[in-house]
Structure formats: C-alpha cells, structure tokens
Amino acid sequence: MGQLIAGPFAGQLLGQFGAEIIKIEPPGVGDPLRVWRELDVDGTSPWFRSIGRNKKSIAIDLRKPEGRGLAKRLAIKSDVILENFKPGTLEKWEMGPAHLHPHNPSLIFTRVSGYGQTGPWAPRPGYASVCEAESGFRYINGFPDPQTGGLAGPPVRPNISLGDSVAGLHAAFGTVMALLARQKNEGKGSTVDVSIVESMLNLMEGIIPEYDRKGKIRGPSGSSVTGIVPTNAYPCLPDPSNASLPTYIVIGANGDTIYNRLMEAIGRPDLIGPDYQNNQRRVQKQGVIEGAISAWTSKHKPEEVIDVMNKASVPVGRVVSVKEVVENDQVKARGAVRDVWVENKEGGDEEGWNVKMLGTVPMLEGIDPQPKWAGPEVGQHTDEILMNNLGFSVEEVSRLREAGIIG
C-alpha cells in the first residue's frame, strides 16, 4: 500500500526474490509513477514497468469504507503490509497494528515515511529531496567555497531520487529481518519503522563521530572525497571515436602500494617516498598529487589512461552515460540488464515490446535473475486476487466493480 518510489522500490526488491507482491492502486489512474518522466507508446512510464515488475495489481478505492474493508481482508491474510503513507493514515483507516494484529498477530508492518512514525516531525510530509537536505547529505554535495569550506552556491543533487531508493533498501532489509525475528518470537509480528532521513544518515560514514570527537564539520569536496588522496575525476583528451563519452576518468589510488604503482605509471617516481607513503601525509600534499595526475591524464585519451592503469593494477573507470552502461561488455556478460516483455493491451498491429531493466541483484544461487513480468496494468489482477485469495464469486466481483469499489 504505497506509491511513487520508496515503498514500491522495497516491494520490487522483495518481489525479485520470490515474494508474492500484491500492489493496491486507486482505480483508473493507478500509481502516479505510471505517468512520470518518459512515457512509452501506451502512455505508461518504462520506469514503472521496472519498479512494478513481478507485482500483481489490484485496483481498490481506499476512500470508500468497503474498499478499505477489502484491503483489511487482504492484509490479514498476508505476511507483511508495506506502506509509505504519511504517519497516521493507516490508523485513520483503522488498518494500523492495533486494528489488524488481533486478527493476524504475525502480521509485519513495514512503514516508510520522511521522518519516522514518532517524534515532533513525524506528521510532516517528507519527500526524498527535503529529507536528503535535512540529513546533511546535500551539504556535502557540491563544490567548496575556498574561504569558508562550505558550499559555494546551491548543493548539487544526483539526478535520481536517492533518498527514496535508500529508504526502500532499508525497508526491504528491515522486512527480511522482521521475518527472521518472527521465527524466533513464536510467530509474533512487529513494526519496521523506516525514515528517509535516518536511511540517508546511515550512509554518512564517519561524519557524526568525527564531528563529536574532533569538532570537524565535513563540507563539500567537488569530485574528490575529504581526507582520502588520491581519488578523483581527472580530465582526458576527447576521444574522436566516441564523441558521446565524457572526457573524464576516475582513478582511485588511495591504497599505499596502489599509489606507488600509479606514480610509477605516470612517470612521477619523485612523488614516492616517506613524505607520500601513507594517506595522512598524502592529504597534506593533495594539491601536488592531484596536479601531477591531472597533468598526465590531460595528455591522453580515456582508453589510453585505462590501458596504462589496468597494466599497473590501479582502479580506474570512465565517466559514462546510460548508453555506455547498456553496451558495456561486463554488464552484458553478467546479464545485469535484462529484456522484459510488455504485452500491448491497447490493440493495434504491435503485439508488444521489450523494455530493458536491471536484473535481480545481488545474484543469489538458485534465484532466477530474469524478472518474471513487467509492471502490470492498473487492476490487471483484481479479479484473480479477489477470487483466489478472498474466495469471492464472479457475481460479487461484478457488484464491487459496478459500485466503483474496485477497478
């Protein structure tokens, strides 16, 4: 029970590994994500086809008491209810833990929200962008002001809804933990309380303990990372054979022996020795080291840099677009990107089409990485679920549809 990204992404992850996911959507429009960003020939977002994979869609009008009654009956028969509504919504609908646990004590509630189910900010709406800012994540993204070390202008955001996806990961992980705990707790259900802010805080490495113990406030660092040298994006010559490829390369050589190999490879053995032999000393000489690497890479094409770095066993990678990702030999060899068939429900000459999406990761032995089906049409499984899961007759389903309770 949720829409857009955070909750549905958690459902996607669980569904990839075999969970039966029943997605409740409002009749007609369905999840708003269906019409976000680029739209396919049938008017549905390819993004939704990916995040909705392996899910069954039932269209129920939750604004109506009888619709909420159907959702309750489905929840009572389920292992998990996954939702990302504003806190208090399920309680208003009489579908919270206090309402449903008497009917199904083993039911697990996985609840995703901006700030969590408790605390003074719990009632606030919390979109990922806002929660990324409140977690401190946006402050460390961008380019530093040379005078203050803080942001020089507005922060740079990744061009994805990172906070939603990170919260979805935490929700899926928390759900699995709750299912394992239930086995040891005599089948007793529990609540998994996922906050987008706290999920982002969980990515912040040593920022909080460093502030506590040393009073350090980490700021933005452009394309490098504070306190680790060298790891950065370095300019290269344009590659005429691939004009779409950005002319930057990322080199990570912050390991002591890797650093030495890098300096030998670029012809700067003068930057090897006691003054450069551990990370703390290299941090003090970051400008000299970064300047030497940039001076060398800027005279070579990306493929030339990659060839030299690979021979020296120095981690290196291109800055690429999605086009290069899809065409990447390693991605192809691993089957990381999969073609999934979409049946054309609109009629016409075209029977359907394939849409590319990420396969199942991580790869688990015995788990088929191929998605079973792409995100379904709104309410595609309504009749199947009501009749097979709740035992409704054809006549009962018809009555509900005529009354506008289902779609």
Image (spheres, rainbow, N blue to C red):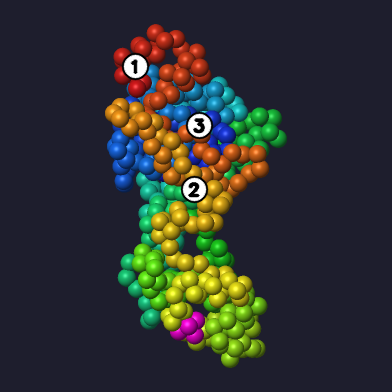
Name the residue located 69 percent from the left edge and 30 percent from the top edge: 186
Could you tell whether 108 is left or right of 128 in the image?
right
Please indicate, yes or no, whether residue 8 appears anywhere in the rendered image: no
Q: Earlier in the sequence, mark 1 or mark 3?
A: 3
Residue at the disc numbered 1: 401
Q: Residues within 10 Å of mark 3 (few under 14, many from 20)?
A: many
- Whether residue 241 is situated above or below residue 339 in the rendered picture: below
Residue stretch in magenta: 292-296
- Whether residue 132 is situated above or below residue 87 in the rendered picture: below
| Prevailing secondary structure of the magenta residues | helix
Q: Report the disc number at residue 21.
A: 3
Closest to the observer, 403 or 224: 224
Q: Residues within 10 Å of mark 2 (few under 14, many from 20)?
A: some
In the image, what residue type sits under mark 2?
Answer: Val
- Whether residue 358 is situated above or below residue 26 in the rendered picture: below
SS state under label 3: strand
Name the residue located 31 percent from the left edge and 14 percent from the top edge: 402
Closest to the observer, 104 or 205: 205
- For the N terminus, the image quarter is top left
SS state under label 1: helix
Please indicate, yes or no, whether residue 176 appears anywhere in the rendered image: yes
Spot occupied by residue 207 in the image (x, y as percentages of width and height): 53, 66
Q: Are marks 1 and 3 in contact (CB under 8 Å)?
A: no
Q: Earlier in the sequence, mark 3 or mark 2?
A: 3
In the image, what residue type sits under mark 3?
Answer: Ile
Q: CA distance from mark 3 to mark 2?
A: 22 Å
- For the C terminus, the image quarter is top left
